[in-house]
Image: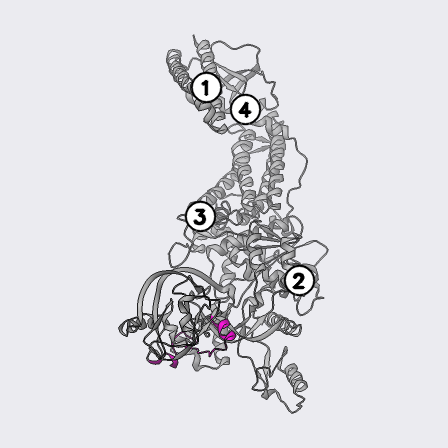
Amino acid sequence: MTIPAQFDAKTIENKWYDYWMKNNYFHSEPDHRTPYTIVIPPPNVTGVLHMGHMLNNTIQDVLIRRARLKGLNACWVPGTDHASIATEAKVVAKLKAEGINKNDLTREEFLKHAWEWTDKYGGTILEQLKKLGASCDWERTKFTMDPDMSASVIRSFVDLYNKGLIYRGYRMVNWDPEAKTTLSDEEVIYEEQQGKLFFLKYKIEGSEDFLTIATTRPETIFGDTAICINPNDERFTHLKGKKAIVPICGRVIPIIEDEYVDVEFGTGCLKVTPAHDMNDKTLGEKHNLEIVDIFNEDATLNSFGLHYQGKDRFVVRTEIAKELEETGALAKTEIHLNKVGTSERTKAVIEPRLSDQWFLKMEELVKPAIKSVLETGDIKLHPKRFENTYAHWLNNIRDWNISRQLWWGHRIPAYYYGDGKEDFVVAENIEEALKLAQEKTSNLKLETKDLKQDVDALDTWFSAWLWPMSVFGGIMDPESPDFKYYYPTNDLVTGPDILFFWVARMIIAGYEYAGEKPFTNVYLTGLVRDKQRRKMSKSLGNSPDPLDLIEKFSADGVRVGLLLSASAGNDIMFDEELCSQGKAFSNKIWNAFKLIKGWEVSETIPQPESSKVAIEWYEAKLQQTLLDIEDNFEKYRISDSLMAIYKLVWDDFCSWFLEMIKPAYQQPIDSVTFAKAIEMLENNLKLLHPFMPFLTEEIWQLIAERTPEEALIVSTWPEVKPFDAKLIADFENSIEVISGIRTIRKDKNIPFKDVIELKGINSENVSTYFDSIITKLGNVSTFEYVSEKVDGALSFRVKSNEYFIPITGNIDVEAEIAKLTEELNYTKGFLKSVEAKLSNEKFVNGAPEKVLNLEKQKQADALAKIATIEQSLAGLK
């Protein structure tokens, strides 16, 4: 078989992915084996692959491929999320570009456009994941709007409503004026922004007096329905029971008293706008104040805004400040830092708004989720430090606002039959709703046409929190074979930014519906940042296209580049150089394979002692590394596992093992050693396969003809066996001897083709097991141990042992004496400076222990070097 000189990633990536798909290696069905299950964090259906996806899905693929090699029934369920807000925004923008206004369409017409958009773009990201090598069970691909998935969401809503956990209430909610929908508290990101504090003058009715009130939002004066003072504030005692006049709109409002007012903040009195502030609403309810809503759904002012009607709130803020100043109602402005709530999706500034919404009670639901992570440890977060964040969120949880003013998504299964707020029923379909409505009203004449379904959709996360169960049909049929076999899943890989949005809620849902955890381990990845530590984004132009990286560096190269620096929970400072390193590693492995396959094999020549010893050492080294790998995987240190394999293959296999067994130039290798070299290479490929699936499968298949059942992807992970740790330690000593020989050869310009003699004084009585290796790699003709120092020889030390290389005619003795004398004088000078430090009582008493030990080590090294140089000089004279 001819092996190509260069490794062609592009050709083999398509070839082997097609081969894996054709042989159905990714698909799983329940059987006698232990299952290993991962569910993908479903990306937005309209999304495209970015660096965060690359990292997340590479880690998942590593875990699933390793589980497959370990003989587990590996199942990785892929899928996409319908992403209500993001997808509806894209569809609305597309329609706008076509001259179509969403408001001119019926719900059914709009949803037709939304499904067309989804059908066109929905599979893009999953197809891109295949380029990465993701070995998902594509036959199990799910979409959160699939009929069975939708049915699960609706059943969940009905069940929770019937348990009294879902209710409809008129509440102050977070309103996103760009998406024109409510958001849950967790979808609001608070950012510190520099703004202004406006000091407004309110005239006291029936007098020339006025009150000055500080506000960051002067445009909301149109919604003012009271001014509040602290009853204990003596400054305002004279205002009790009086009324004030709102600037510009002229509305007369009462001055109320409440200890809620902070006498230290601003001017010590507060304008109350119950429709546009949560705390103001509480005050309004307590004091029975009028509620005046001044905003349209897009945050423009409505008719209450008078001549500002139709203008955006921020435009009004600028214009009204000017008008207030012109009318004498603006006392002053100050620069003010303020925490402003913004939409996690659209980045728009949130507007508090009163409206009827659906809520899920969380107080009781959250308790098992707190216990499983923070008390029993049934679910483990990696790294553990995220438990603090998890605890903070769950211990301070509020009821979840689950309704959204959107058309794209799961429509709330509430059906209205009258005009009253309580004139509704909740059911999985309209037929069941009709029966319930007839029972509730005792009106059998009601028909389905008399029922109107709630127009709102459910929060996207309300479907996502069921994901580990719904993908296996566990909500609709808890007894389904798939659900009983694959649930609970094993590992979840996701970002810490959705620890609450998704992870915690899945845990809550798992205990509520299945009575057990949805997964055992949560691996929280870091963010992928550029080398300047900036978060990658399209707007900054610092986010490379993952497919371009794969084209340039290969899928294996990119996977290795990402994972080498991807420790759990820590951000990755991404640099393309990492992928270049991954590509170089691929080439190193490929060239090692070519070297082995290029050797002529002899069935007759005996195995050299050096090869026998090399094999025993590498088998021990591989077992030691395998233990490290297993330990790192157990602790979810994926990058450490890769680094251990990287060092094993690059340093131990390529740099040492192959050199130790390599036959002499144009000579054959014995068949026993060759067979072991192939066996060791195959073990390396098994360890590497989860990280570098394409390259390893290519080499595996080139080593020998394989049936589909013998493919690397379904082979067996190396077995952990006992090993001789002393062998590994002894070899480290031999490496130092070989390095000493090579240093002298380099310094004295002795070519490797010239054989040398080596003599040693084994004062430490180290093992001589690797002497045949030293002889081969040093090109030593004879190696013997002596009891006394050798005259007329160059020498070097390894620990307390001395080694001597007798002088040959190739060395200029006089020049060597001069060079060694210069080196001796320099070292003595260095030693003098170190000993001066150590004899300085002030330094010794004040220096940290680490610094002191370093100086003592310098002293010991210098003394040893001086002894060696003096020995070499003695041998030359």
Q: Mark 2 near mark 1, Cβ–Cβ under 8 Å? A: no
Q: Quadrant of the C terminus?
A: top left
Q: CA distance from mark 2 to mark 1?
A: 66 Å
Asked whether residue 752 appears in the rendered view, the answer is no
Q: CA distance from mark 4 to mark 2?
A: 64 Å
In the depicted view, which residue is nearer to us: 877 or 264?
A: 264
Kindly indicate the quadrant of the structure image that contains residue 440.
Answer: bottom right
Mark sitting earlier along the chain (4/1): 4
Q: CA distance from mark 4 to mark 1?
A: 31 Å
Q: Which mark is residue 71?
A: none
Q: Which residues are magenta?
A: 280-306
Q: Nearer the viewer, mark 2 or mark 1?
A: 2
Q: CA distance from mark 2 to mark 3?
A: 37 Å
Q: Position of residue 832 (x, y in %)?
A: 41, 17
Residue on which disc 4 sits: 776
Q: Nearer the viewer, mark 3 or mark 4?
A: 3
Q: CA distance from mark 1 to mark 3?
A: 40 Å
Residue on which disc 1 sits: 862
Q: Quadrant of the N terminus?
A: top right
* Count of numbered marks: 4
Mark sitting earlier along the chain (1/3): 3
Q: At 58% across and 52% down in the image, what residue appears?
A: 387
